[in-house]
């Protein structure tokens, strides 16, 4: 396994992705980079991302979802690491939180509107309190050797369709042997009125992982959203459930939730394949280092804007944008085939922190 990681470090030196401070020279000849293609299908409301012709992920924006999302996400071997339900239900999966689909970016209190918890399951009486992120246009879709780029624009709208925010997002999809990665760089711009992100726990970058990457559960649990609406998360059979969180601060398991850190990793075994997922925060982000809304039942989220919720009211942020003001959030998501160590993830973080 050590040789696999050494190969990955060597492969990415000079490409802007990897531990460039390793001091090890590039081998010659270098392994050929896989071809990453980014293919829009406007009629299907999706953009497919493939690596050497095989599926990696897709940016989807069907009318049945209240936000665009990347779904599903796969390892280099093709193993799916995100939950299938509610779009493609699989045996033994949890069926809670229907708004947890793939990898998304949203928030639960934007000028009093809840964008995070919105789904088709919301009762009609609650609908006016919900917000929707509406895909508007694909600005760029470009493939290449080792990486592809997708740039999109969306709007965060209220129940009446009035836009509060414009979202301009750049995705960079990278691929190498035993590694897949996504950079999500999102700029939010307030439009005609001030926009406040009140401190809440439900935000900002979230991923719902496959059942095998959940942490084994011991009890049924009940969770509430920003408006107090409760969702039950039952205890299920833990056979094959292998996930374990570790943060950059040395915390593990459930202890990671509500704490701050520059990255968190989640390791486990999916369909017989050791897998490590990691979300990396960036030093330029608002609220760095982020709080981790990382739940054992499979929600893996980074929330830099929920300070009051995570400090029991001792501190607060209430991040605000005036009309025309913008903020950019940068994250890198790693999908690694193998059991990575915290030192490996720290190396990837240092590279990301140096990136423009």
Image: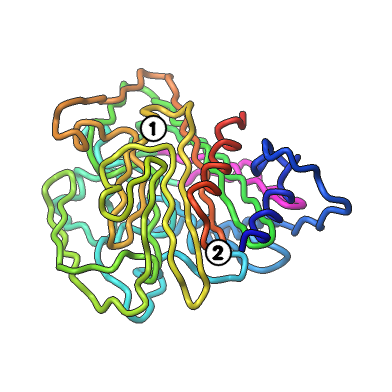
Q: Which mark is residue 253?
A: none
Direction from residue 297 to residue 136 in the image, left or right: right
Residue at which label 2 appears: 338
On-image quarter of the C terminus: top right
Q: Is residue 161 visible?
A: no
On-image quarter of the N terminus: bottom right
Q: Residues within 10 Å of mark 1 (few under 14, many from 20)?
A: many
Q: Residue at x 56, y 44 (%)?
A: 183
Q: Nearer the viewer, mark 2 or mark 1?
A: 2
Q: Residue at x 77, y 55 (%)?
A: 33
Task: Depth check: give the residue in front, 165 or 197.
Answer: 197
Q: Earlier in the sequence, mark 2 or mark 1?
A: 1
1 w.r.t. 330: above or below: below
137 w.r.t. 217: above or below: above
In the picture, residue 196 is in which quadrant? top left
Range of the magenta residues? 135-155
- Secondary structure under tag 2 reads loop
Q: Is residue 251 visible?
A: yes
Residue at which label 1 appears: 289
Direction from residue 329 to residue 157 in the image, left or right: left
Whole-percent x, y for residue 43 in the image: 57, 61
Task: Depth check: give the residue in front, 275 or 234.
Answer: 275
Q: Residue at x 26, y 35 (%)?
A: 306
């Amino acid at each position: 396994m050590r040789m696999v990681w050494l190969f990955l470090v060597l492969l990415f030196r000079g490409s802007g992705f990897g531990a460039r401070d390793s001091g090890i020279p590039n081998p010659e000849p270098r392994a050929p980079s896989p071809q990453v293609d980014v293919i829009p299908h406007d009629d299907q409301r999706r953009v497919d991302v493939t690596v050497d012709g095989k599926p990696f992920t897709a940016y989807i924006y069907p009318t049945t979802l209240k936000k665009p999302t990347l779904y599903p996400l796969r390892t280099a071997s093709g193993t799916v690491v995100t939950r299938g339900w509610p779009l493609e239900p699989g045996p033994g999966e949890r069926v809670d939180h229907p708004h947890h689909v793939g990898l998304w970016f949203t928030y639960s209190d934007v000028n009093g509107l809840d964008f995070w918890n919105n789904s088709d399951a919301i009762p009609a009486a609650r609908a006016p309190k919900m917000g929707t992120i509406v895909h508007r246009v694909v600005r760029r879709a470009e493939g290449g050797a080792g990486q592809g780029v997708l740039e999109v624009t969306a709007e965060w709208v209220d129940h009446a369709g009035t836009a509060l925010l414009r979202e301009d997002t750049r995705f960079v999809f990278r691929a190498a042997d035993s590694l897949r990665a996504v950079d999500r760089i999102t700029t939010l711009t307030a439009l005609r009125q001030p926009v406040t992100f009140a401190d809440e726990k439900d935000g900002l970058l979230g991923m719902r992982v496959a059942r095998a990457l959940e942490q084994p559960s011991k009890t049924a649990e009940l969770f509430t959203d920003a408006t107090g609406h409760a969702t039950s998360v039952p205890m299920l059979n833990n056979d094959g459930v292998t996930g374990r969180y570790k943060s950059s601060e040395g915390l593990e398991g459930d202890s990671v939730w509500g704490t701050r850190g520059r990255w968190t990793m989640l390791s486990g075994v999916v369909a017989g394949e050791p897998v490590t997922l990691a979300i990396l925060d960036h030093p330029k982000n608002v609220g760095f280092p982020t709080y981790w809304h990382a739940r054992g039942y499979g929600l893996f989220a980074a929330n830099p804007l929920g300070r009051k919720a995570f400090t029991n009211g001792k501190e607060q942020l209430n991040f605000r944008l005036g009309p025309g003001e913008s903020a950019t959030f940068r994250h890198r998501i790693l999908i690694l085939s193998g059991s990575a160590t915290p030192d490996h993830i720290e190396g990837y973080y240092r590279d990301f922190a140096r990136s423009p």
